[in-house]
Image: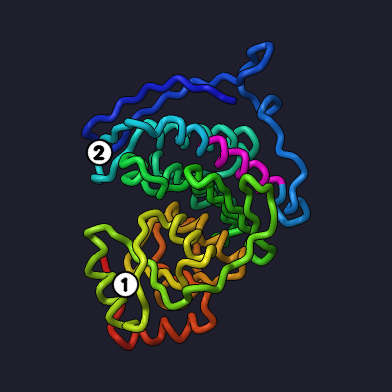
Amino acid sequence: MATAEYSNNLGGGTSHETTWKFTQASPAGQALTAATIPRVHQSPYAHVPYAHEVSIALRAAREAGATALQMQGGIEAVEKADGSPVTPGDLAADAIVRQHLTLNFPADAILSEEEADSAQRLSNRRLWIIDPIDGTKDYVAGTGEWAVQVALAVDGVLVLGVLDLPAEGLCLVGVPGHGAWILDANGQRPLHIDTANQDVLITSQSKRNREAVAKVTAALPEFRSLHATSVGVKVWRMISGHAGLYVHPRPLAEWDAAAPAAVLLGAGGTVTDLAGGPLRFNSPGGRCLGLVYSKRDDHAALITRMAAAGVELMP
């Protein structure tokens, strides 16, 4: 297992500095390198496109998730310049994922919630999109409603996504157009959508989204509501049979949307923006223009109904 020494400077400015020193446990105590990172055994998705990238993303997300879970108890957050919380667990998970990606794909660009964005990523065909802990408030509160999210977009299109839910002991892998898989205590196997509870709309509990959620529920009155915070957790609740639809009628950061979208698409669900178009990634602002995720056959009809009821992209 990799261990890390952490130090950071979180001030009131527009960025924060983070330093992590890694060592790899071994008889010789050698440093963590591409050669010493433990290898993933043969997987059921070894035949899919980007199989090597999937294996690295899976290892990175699971290691990051295990580390964050170990750090969770009694952890405290500080406020970033944008008002959102960050903890040592977020920064540890981010550093671990970055370590794996930069060792294996040094030419690729990375967009992460916990690092400053760079316009240089826009000229790179390959972009890794990371949310080291999606659901930081729940993480701080000690719940299991959080996920480590890692995705890869090539030419703006998602090609893979990994969701690690450490508190639930499971990890989800999705390769759009080629399948999805679940890894848990029972091993690894194909991930299939449970079609139960298609009349449940999964929504956000955050105060800033209440007006948007109210408009959606008014437009779709036949739906019951289920609340969750992390987008990754929302998608798992949908796939596992607790909900049929998730609508987010506000811009959302690509790191929130990418990995959950890839997993749902791989499992056979539908993912669009609020207008019904495909999601595109590696945009200049790093944000998606609303989200509609579903496992329903009437996805397009629901979007038409919401538009007719005045549901539109909110700021």
Q: Nearer the viewer, residue 214 or 199?
A: 199
Residue indicated by mark 2? 79
Q: Is residue 30 left or right of residue 11?
A: right
Mark 1 nearby-residue class (10 Å; few <14, some 14–19, many ≥20): some
Residue indicated by mark 1? 313
Q: Which residues are magenta?
A: 52-64
First in sequence, mark 1 or 2: give its number. 2
Q: Residue at x 58, y 35 (%)?
A: 102
Q: Residue at x 52, y 62 (%)?
A: 261
Q: Nearer the viewer, residue 300 or 281?
A: 300
Q: Nearer the viewer, residue 285 or 136?
A: 136
Say if residue 171 shows up in the picture. yes
Q: Position of residue 200 (x, y in %)?
A: 41, 73
Q: Position of residue 55 (x, y in %)?
A: 67, 44
Looking at the rendered structure, the kind of residue marked 1 is Leu
Foreground label between 1 and 2: 2
Assign the N terminus to one quadrant of the image. Answer: top right
